Image: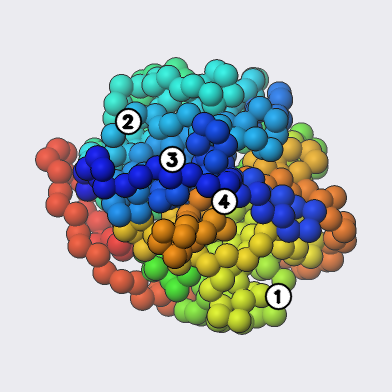
């Protein structure tokens, strides 16, 4: 859709939302220059980056809809210099340019990077900020990072690694800028190698780099099969990366697209993170996803590898409420702190009589994922169905970055009420979680035996069909089965 014509919407403002829930405070991020809420817009799919040298400096990127009457969206961003209490929203990366699927990241010295997808071409580009997200400079030309939907990227933060500073990204190969599903940059995102394919064509996932430079990619097949794919030579600038280990991971269920709580999007994608603590759990590989075990609802499921991704544990259910196929534990994600603690957050309907109103929940592990703390809610409840910008969803993911004392979370919620529409609005929020943010939960032991890399077949949930996009001119992709609807 083109941008909404001038005069079809008004940028009215109201007080910004600061939502208190017990000891946890959620601060609205997408505010105007005076710190006020903007009525009539929408913001979702937030991706957060934190300066590891100064936790006061945080940036969040999101999909910015100037009006809910249009599907036209841009690459919004906000920053804080006081650890999330006050947010500034200077605007978008490029005015009136149709962008989507924001992913931000940071290197070990505090440079921020923003990967953004040009919707009309499925091509992406990388932007960099050297001042904590206050301003951004395009590193690659428009669309110069290849890419596709849904893309994700990471970078090598280990100074002793051969690939230190290299950036890696992968995407859903069917919806791509050009052939392939993986690319690498050895010059900080300025140029990108010609894309190559990843074995099994994993989709809807993320990737991370171990302290030895090995690259791990986690994704699935849009159903019940999930993989951890390793490249041990992507860190070598003199070779074209190859993938030398493909492990099937049992996550205990299936990916859900078009679920009750998010009809036009995912109930959760795959998140992979590697421990770089230097301690007993160093280079453990962790995978988390919100999956459906039996066709109803979703659970936040976790699996871990202690042998470089060769084998993974049996799936472990992080949400600790009674099993109920009517409940949704969705948008599950995780991060690993420098000291090895694992933090996980997700949206949760366990306390809702209607099984759809949602709260943000939190749990952590201090023993490499063997045991998890009792779950605690960290936000007020909200209705996820309101404030849709012609898309019938509240995005496809939320994100977290962890440090040694807690985690910084970016999530979307509908706390603000717009009297002009009679509905609440989708906005982006920041909240700080930590094991000491409330009464300190005591982890309880749960057996998670190591299992051979096998997958349990689970029926794929039925999704609502969407029209297949008209193919762009360019290289013909390799044959693949018809994909599920694009988020």
Lateral position of residue 158 relative to residue 266, left or right: right
| Residue 177, quarter of picture | top left
Residue at point 55% right, 80% down?
Answer: 354
Circles 4 and 3, Cβ within 8 Å, touching? The answer is: no
Pick whichever, 79 or 295, lies toward us. Answer: 79
Q: Quadrant of residue 265?
A: bottom left
Numbered disc 3: secondary structure: strand
| Residue position for label 4 | 411
Label 4: which secondary element:
strand
Give the label on residue 95, or none: 2
Examine the rendering and report whether any part of residue 179 can be seen: no
Q: Is residue 438 visible?
A: yes
Q: Residue at x 26, y 43 (%)?
A: 7
Q: Name the front one of labels 4 and 2.
A: 2
Residue bearing the label numbered 1 = 321
Which mark lies nearer to you, 4 or 3?
4
From what the image shows, is residue 335 above or below residue 189? below
Please tell me which of labels 4 and 1 falls first in the chain.
Answer: 1
* Residue 83 drawn at (x, y percent): 70, 34
Q: Earlier in the sequence, mark 1 or mark 2?
A: 2
Report which residue position mark 3 lands on.
Answer: 102
* Mark 2 neighbour class, 10 Å CA radius: few under 14, some 14 to 19, many 20 or more: few
Distance between the alpha carbons at the discs numbered 4 and 2: 24 Å
Using the rendered view, name the quadrant where residue 364 is placed. Answer: bottom right
Residue 251 is left or right of residue 66, and the answer is: right
């Amino acid at each position: 859709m083109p941008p909404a014509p001038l005069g079809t919407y008004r940028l009215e403002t109201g007080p910004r939302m600061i939502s208190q829930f017990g000891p946890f405070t959620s601060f609205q991020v997408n505010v105007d220059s005076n710190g006020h809420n903007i009525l009539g817009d929408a913001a979702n799919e937030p991706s957060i980056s934190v300066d590891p040298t100064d936790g006061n400096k945080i940036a969040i990127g999101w999909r910015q809809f100037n009006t809910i009457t249009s599907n036209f969206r841009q690459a919004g961003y906000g920053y804080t210099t006081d650890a999330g209490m006050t947010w500034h929203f200077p605007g978008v990366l490029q005015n009136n340019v149709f962008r989507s699927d924001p992913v931000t990241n940071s290197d070990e010295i505090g440079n921020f990077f923003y990967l953004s997808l040009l919707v009309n071409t499925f091509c992406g580009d990388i932007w960099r900020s050297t001042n904590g997200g206050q301003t951004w400079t395009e590193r690659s030309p428009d669309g110069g990072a290849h890419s596709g939907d849904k893309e994700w990227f990471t970078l090598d933060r280990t100074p002793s690694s051969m690939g230190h500073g290299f950036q890696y990204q992968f995407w859903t190969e069917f919806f791509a800028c050009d052939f392939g599903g993986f690319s690498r940059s050895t010059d900080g995102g300025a140029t990108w190698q010609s894309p190559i394919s990843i074995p099994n064509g994993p989709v809807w996932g993320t990737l991370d780099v171990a302290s030895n430079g090995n690259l791990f990619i986690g994704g699935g097949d849009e159903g019940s099969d999930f993989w951890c794919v390793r490249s041990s030579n992507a860190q070598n600038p003199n070779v074209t990366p190859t993938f030398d280990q493909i492990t099937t991971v049992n996550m205990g269920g299936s990916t859900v697209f078009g679920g009750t709580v998010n009809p036009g999007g995912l109930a959760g994608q795959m998140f992979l993170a590697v421990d770089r603590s230097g301690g007993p759990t160093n280079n453990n590989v962790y995978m988390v996803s919100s999956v459906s075990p039996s066709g109803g609802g979703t659970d936040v499921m976790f699996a871990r590898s202690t042998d470089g991704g060769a084998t993974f544990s049996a799936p472990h259910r992080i949400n600790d409420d009674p099993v109920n196929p009517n409940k949704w534990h969705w948008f599950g994600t995780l991060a690993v702190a420098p000291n090895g603690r694992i933090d996980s957050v997700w949206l949760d309907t366990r306390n809702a009589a209607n099984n759809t109103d949602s709260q943000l929940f939190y749990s952590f592990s201090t023993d490499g994922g063997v045991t998890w703390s009792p779950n605690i809610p960290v936000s007020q409840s909200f209705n996820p169905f309101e404030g849709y910008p012609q898309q019938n969803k509240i995005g496809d993911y939320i994100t977290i970055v962890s440090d040694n004392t807690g985690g910084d979370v970016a999530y979307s919620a509908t706390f603000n009420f717009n009297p002009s529409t009679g509905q609440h609005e989708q906005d982006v929020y920041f909240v700080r979680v930590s094991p000491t943010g409330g009464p300190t939960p005591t982890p309880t032991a749960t057996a998670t035996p190591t299992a051979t890399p096998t997958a349990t077949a689970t029926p794929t949930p039925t999704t609502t069909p969407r029209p297949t996009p008209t193919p762009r001119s360019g290289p013909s992709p390799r044959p693949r089965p018809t994909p599920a609807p694009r988020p």
